[in-house]
Image (cartoon, grey):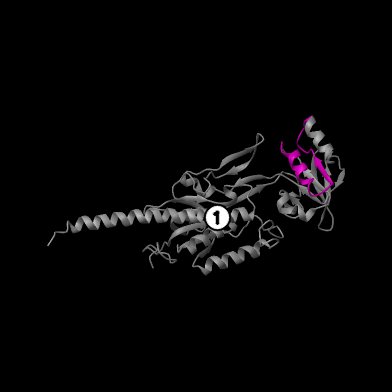
């Protein structure tokens, strides 16, 4: 079957399989993009390392119609949907992407295998770089949290601590105050706040505890409090942190695409692969979607971005195929010469 009009992939003589689109990353954005493309009768391969960012979470939230669904179940059902339209999957880690001599792109996997595609959709997400406090990583996604819209309801009315690591700490504390009256802001590595900020915190009943946090107190596999440098333990049942959000875009370096810093309130909060509203990057033929470019997207937003990128990629392929068809038609007409009258 023609690779451009159906769901089967071409296999050149060298054994390297070629697809209309290779999607790198099998999370919500990647699966949504792959589903859109497969339903458009494109040959699609999803390369997935099997390490979703939200794996520690108990459920997906603020996803209309799927509230509370375990992340692994959502992805498993998404894979079945993609496969039902002819999409294919390959387990592995993509380490680089490069232009191929035949046109299009080649994706190289960690085991040395390669796949080729006319277009790329990269949905590799991001890595959360947590503050260097012992114990945070072990509780990440359980009681160590960052997004109130993802986890606020689950810890409502509990004692919530906020770890200050930058200028947005006060904003964080005031935001989480919406879910609990018992919120404590730990100054940690921030030297102090402005007079107006202290006033805002006091007005909303947010306690401020000075001193560096050096660890967590865990009892019975449940967070019980934070430990300060002097040994004092302040009770809390959830601890809010602001991780540095780092785009997983290393495989795009060979194409000249490097992550760019994202700043908020004068602080670098992470990095992203720059793209337009549809996910198109400055490299023609390469799209991105999800947290690799939109750092604060929740699962529903990432899925929507994947669908937008998938539609844009299909439109781009249609435009190229039309240009080729027009050129072929003109060539055929020129060879046939003028049609003489009777």
Visible residue check, residue 294:
yes
Q: Quadrant of residue 174?
A: top right
Q: Which residue occupies the foreground of this view, 207 or 239?
A: 207
Looking at the image, residue 326 lies above or below residue 168? below
* Residue 136 coordinates in the image, percent (x, y): 74, 49
Looking at the image, residue 261 lies above or below residue 90? above
Looking at the image, residue 131 lies above or below residue 26? above
* Residue 276 coordinates in the image, percent (x, y): 52, 45
Which type of secondary structure does the marked residue at label 1 adopt? helix
Q: How many marks?
A: 1
Q: Outermost residue toward the bottom?
A: 84
Looking at the image, residue 319 lies above or below residue 196? below
Q: Outermost residue toward the right?
A: 232
Q: Quadrant of residue 219?
A: bottom right
Q: Which residues are magenta?
A: 167-194
Q: Is residue 106 left or right of residue 210?
A: left
At 78% from the left and 31% from the top, the residue drawn is 196
Q: Quadrant of the C terminus?
A: bottom left
Query: Is residue 262 rendered magenta in the image?
Result: no
The residue under label 1 is 306
At 59% from the left and 39% from the top, the residue drawn is 261
Q: Outermost residue toward the top?
A: 195
Q: Which residue occupies the foreground of this view, 329 or 338?
A: 338
Q: Quadrant of the N terminus?
A: bottom left
Q: Is residue 89 left or right of residue 160?
A: left
Query: Is residue 185 rendered magenta in the image?
Result: yes
Visible residue check, residue 192:
no
* Residue 11 coordinates in the image, percent (x, y): 40, 64
């Amino acid at each position: 079957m023609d690779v451009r009009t159906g769901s089967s992939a071409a296999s050149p003589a060298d054994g390297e399989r070629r697809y209309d689109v290779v999607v790198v990353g099998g999370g919500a954005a990647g699966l949504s993009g792959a589903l859109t493309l497969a339903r458009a009768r494109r040959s699609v391969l999803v390369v997935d390392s099997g390490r979703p960012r939200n794996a520690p979470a108990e459920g997906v939230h603020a996803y209309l119609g799927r509230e509370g669904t375990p992340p692994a179940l959502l992805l498993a059902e998404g894979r079945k949907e993609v496969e039902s339209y002819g999409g294919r999957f390959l387990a592995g880690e993509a380490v680089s992407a490069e232009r191929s001599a035949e046109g299009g792109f080649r994706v190289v996997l960690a085991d040395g295998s390669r796949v080729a595609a006319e277009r790329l959709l990269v949905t590799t997400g991001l890595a959360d770089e947590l503050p260097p406090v012992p114990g945070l990583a072990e509780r990440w996604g359980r009681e160590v949290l960052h997004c109130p819209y993802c986890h606020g309801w689950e810890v409502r009315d509990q004692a919530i601590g906020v770890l200050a690591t930058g200028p947005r700490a006060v904003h964080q504390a005031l935001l989480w105050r919406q879910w609990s009256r018992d919120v404590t802001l730990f100054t940690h590595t921030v030297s102090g706040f402005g007079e107006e900020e202290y006033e805002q915190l006091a007005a909303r009943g947010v306690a401020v505890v000075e001193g560096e946090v050096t660890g967590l107190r865990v009892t019975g596999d449940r967070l019980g409090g934070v430990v300060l440098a002097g040994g004092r333990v302040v009770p809390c049942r959830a601890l809010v942190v602001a991780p540095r959000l780092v785009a997983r875009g290393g495989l795009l370096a060979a194409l000249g695409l490097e992550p760019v810093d994202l700043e908020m309130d004068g602080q670098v909060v992470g990095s992203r692969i720059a793209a337009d509203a549809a996910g198109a990057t400055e490299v023609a033929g390469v799209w991105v979607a999800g947290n690799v470019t939109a750092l604060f997207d929740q699962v529903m937003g990432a899925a929507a971005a994947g669908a937008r990128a998938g539609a844009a990629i299909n439109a781009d392929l249609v435009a190229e195929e039309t240009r080729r068809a027009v050129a072929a038609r003109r060539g055929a007409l020129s060879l046939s010469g003028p049609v003489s009258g009777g």
